[in-house]
Amino acid sequence: MPDTPTLNRPWLIAVWPGMGHVALNAGVYLLAKLEMTAVAEFEGGDLFDVGQVEVKGGVIQPARRPRNRFFVWTDPEHRHDLVVFLGEAQPPVGKLPFCRQVIDYALGLGVERVVTFAAMATQMRPEHPSRVFGAATDEKGVTELRGHGLTVLEDGNIGGLNGVLLGAAAAAGLRGTCLLGEMPQVFAQVPFPKASLAILEAFTTLTGVGVDMTELAEQSKAVEDQLGELLSRVEDQYGQPPGDDEGADEDDEEEGEFAAEDDSEPPERVAPGTREGVEYRYEGPDEPVQLPSVARIEELFARAAEDRSKAFELKRELDRLGLFKRYEDRFLDLFKHEA
């Protein structure tokens, strides 16, 4: 690890890819709108293996383990500086040792609190408000969640590093909170920015940090309209949407005591109440990208290089084209220190 920066009462926010890009997009939105800066990276040693190699133009590229990076933002109001940890994937084994490494670095930064973002798939419809579910490592945190009108997870578990990191934080004497944004189970593998927006609205209320949500709100409304129209067409044709069980009890729709297995492929349908904990194995298209799309991507990269607050527009376009994984390293390099 490089030398640690000096921060003021920082909070750590940790995100990984998963259902609906909910956590990842919330984290990336913070990077962009707060114009955060990359400060550290580590691979996690032998906890990560390599299951495939990339081919570009017929040439096999060197094998690379998933990257894990820290980004920081200094609060001009001197309340809480923020540290965002963005991991490309969750280790198949050794999750607790990995989380201890993250927490050790966080302690070196003086982190006071740890927050993870995740998704909660329920039987909600796209046009419904996304609720934010929460859990905390102590009673004070639970009371705080209730005070902000969030739905507390009374029982069950939070799968993957979204939960394990908070367990490691608690063991190290740090307070922790998990915020889960609600999304429709039938669209679990489709980006759902409304849940990311709901998480960030709750997060900014907890921290007092101001973030311009205009762009994310506009994207949320556009996706809501698209998915709502699609769902209506399916219902008109088949009578009920896929994954909607007749006679389901609405009061129980967000319940569910078992998290999805962390090392399994993302399911076709995610059961109501599934806590996110599955690595999102996103595969971009194999065919060459069309020239107009390349030109558009390069234009957005140039804009984001000049003004990092424009980076989320680039992320949105890469998601639309199914190309974020292909451009991920270059995208996150936008947040490196300037030479």
Image (tube, rainbow, N blue to C red):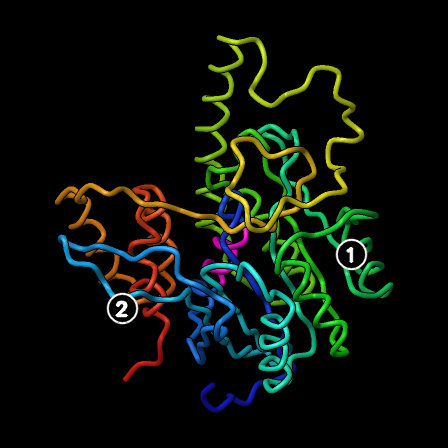
> For the residue marked with disc 2, what is the amino acid?
Glu
Residue 138 at x, y = what percent? 83, 66
Seen from the viewer's position, the closer of residues 248 and 78 is 248
Viewer-proximal residue among 230 and 54: 54
104 falls in the magenta region:
no
Number of dots carrying numbers:
2
Please identify the quadrant where the C terminus is shown.
Answer: bottom left
Residue in front for this viewpoint, 219 or 102: 102
Q: Residue 236 placed where, x, y %?
A: 51, 9
Extent of the magenta region: 23-30
Residue at 51 percent across and 31 percent down: it is: 268
Label 2 crowd bin: few (<14), some (14–19), many (20+), radius 10 Å: few
Which badge, 2 or 1, is on the more N-terminal residue? 1
Q: Is residue 304 above or below residue 184?
A: below
Task: Quadrant for residue 260, please give it.
Answer: top right
Tag 1 residue: 145
* Of the two numbered discs 2 and 1 in the rendering, the one whose residue sits closer to the viewer: 1
Question: In the rendered view, does 206 fall on the left or right side of 319?
Answer: right
Q: Amino acid at mark 1?
A: Leu
Residue 6: image location, x then y, percent: 55, 90
Can you say whether 285 is above or below 304 in the image? above
Q: For the residue carrying disc 1, how many other residues have a C-alpha within 10 Å: few (<14), some (14-19), or many (20+)?
A: many
From the viewer's perspective, is residue 268 above or below residue 41?
above
Cα distance between the residues tagged 2 and 1: 38 Å
Identify the secondary structure beneath mark 2.
helix
Check residue 306 in the rendering and tell me which mark sits there, or answer none: 2
Q: Main secondary structure of the magenta part?
A: helix
